[in-house]
Amino acid sequence: MKVKRYQFNSLPFVSIVDEADCPIDPYVSCYLNGALSAKSANTRFRYANELLFVLQYFSEKNIDLPERVASGIFISQMEYMQFYDRCCLSKGSGDEGINIRFLDINDKHLRNIIVANQKGMTKVASETLQGRIRRLRQFLLWLFDEFHEVQDADEKTKNKFNGLISKIRLDEDALGKNGEQHVGDPEESVIPDDVFVKFLEMVMPSSPNNPFKASRVRNYLIVNLLVLSGIRRGALAKLKISDCLFHGTNDQLAIYRSANDPTDPRSEKPNQKTKAHFASVDPGFLEKVKFYIDNVRILFPRAQFHDFVFVSENDSKGTAGQPLSLKAINAIFQKLSRSLGFHVHPHVLRHKWNEIFDKKGESLGVNPALLEDARKYAMGWSQNTTQNRRYNEKRIAQKTREISMAHQKRVDQQE
């Protein structure tokens, strides 16, 4: 089994297929491309990988989930608990992969310690565990509606199913509440300032530390556009020439969602995750983007057939001039990270942007409430979002520390 992406009439689809690329089950395909059709292509792909984990596990146990739900048998509490235990482990490290290599060890307690340690080393993040549990629950709910909604299942069947779903939901909610056990240092940056300066110097086209032999101008613009605007990787990949406002103040980029863009030939179509807004960048930098469009992008004939700003410059697969893929953007950051000796990815620059935004806002004496409204707009968040809390909490923790230290100093002086 594997997850496969494909396009039909320029629309992206995702399916779970067998070795012959045939869908493994019509109900699985209908769930991914019907029930989840309102989700973005990338979200559906993530959900498909979670569902793949679910289906692979139950296939190993010779359990057909659609058949079980159709029959009203479902899965037992014991079967669910065994599935939960497997979800805790990284993919490919099932119970059969955990063994004691030192066969001459006879002490039972020592063997238990070794096995427990091996299991602990293979545990996944709580977000991954929660995603797998959630996907099972939502797939079961969808199957139940498909098989029993019209037939109006009897009370016994409903109660049995609701009991199972309630158990899964309790575990899912508990993971959400207890997932983050780490208390972050409010003084710690996502990218230390000295590393960040080195990173920005390295990506300069003229830098002797630049790890790229080609595409230096394009890669410089990609990195700095993320640094200056705080936009997401998807918004950058779908940025069009017509979205760059090369007039007026010459410092605005139009960021918006575009659903299934028929002009985008990529199978993995990037998109803007949050609501539409204008991103502000330095006018001098936008002039550099225009230079790239007028002097570099124009050299690739295929680029004339679309409006996307950043294009592939490597023709090894016949893609030169085509819109740059999300995987290619990731590859840029992977190469920079290896040279830097520090893991940097597009989304971490969004976090760094927020750190810099906080410092600039405070230095300008901006009212905290206005600062948060401005942050929400710049990030494309709705006014009702709670996403900004992670940045608020960090700033509040820093202020609490300053106030506490000042209070303690005053108390010490009075003693």
Image (tube, helix red, strand yellow):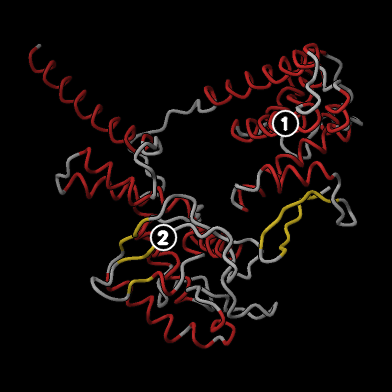
Q: In this view, does 321 lie to the left or right of 4?
A: left
Q: Nearer the viewer, residue 255 or 192?
A: 255
Q: Residue 397: x percent and y percent?
A: 30, 30
Q: Name the residue under label 1.
A: 136
Which residue does the image show at 11% across and 20% down from the upper left? 410
Label 1: element kind: helix
Q: Mark 2 points at which residue?
A: 255
Q: Would you call the spot at circle 2 few (<14 residues within 10 Å), some (14-19), or many (20 or more)?
A: many
Residue flagged by tag 2: what amino acid is it?
Ile
Q: In this view, does 365 lie above or below 293?
A: above
Q: Nearer the viewer, residue 213 or 72?
A: 72
Which residue does the image show at 27% across and 47% down from the upper left? 374
Looking at the image, how many numbered discs can be counted on the residues? 2
Determine which quarter of the picture holds residue 107. Answer: top right
Q: Residue 40: x percent and y percent?
A: 59, 51
Which quadrant, please, contains the C terminus? top left
Q: Residue 412: x percent and y percent?
A: 13, 16
Residue flagged by tag 1: what amino acid is it?
Leu
Label 2 to label 1, Cα distance in Å? Answer: 35 Å
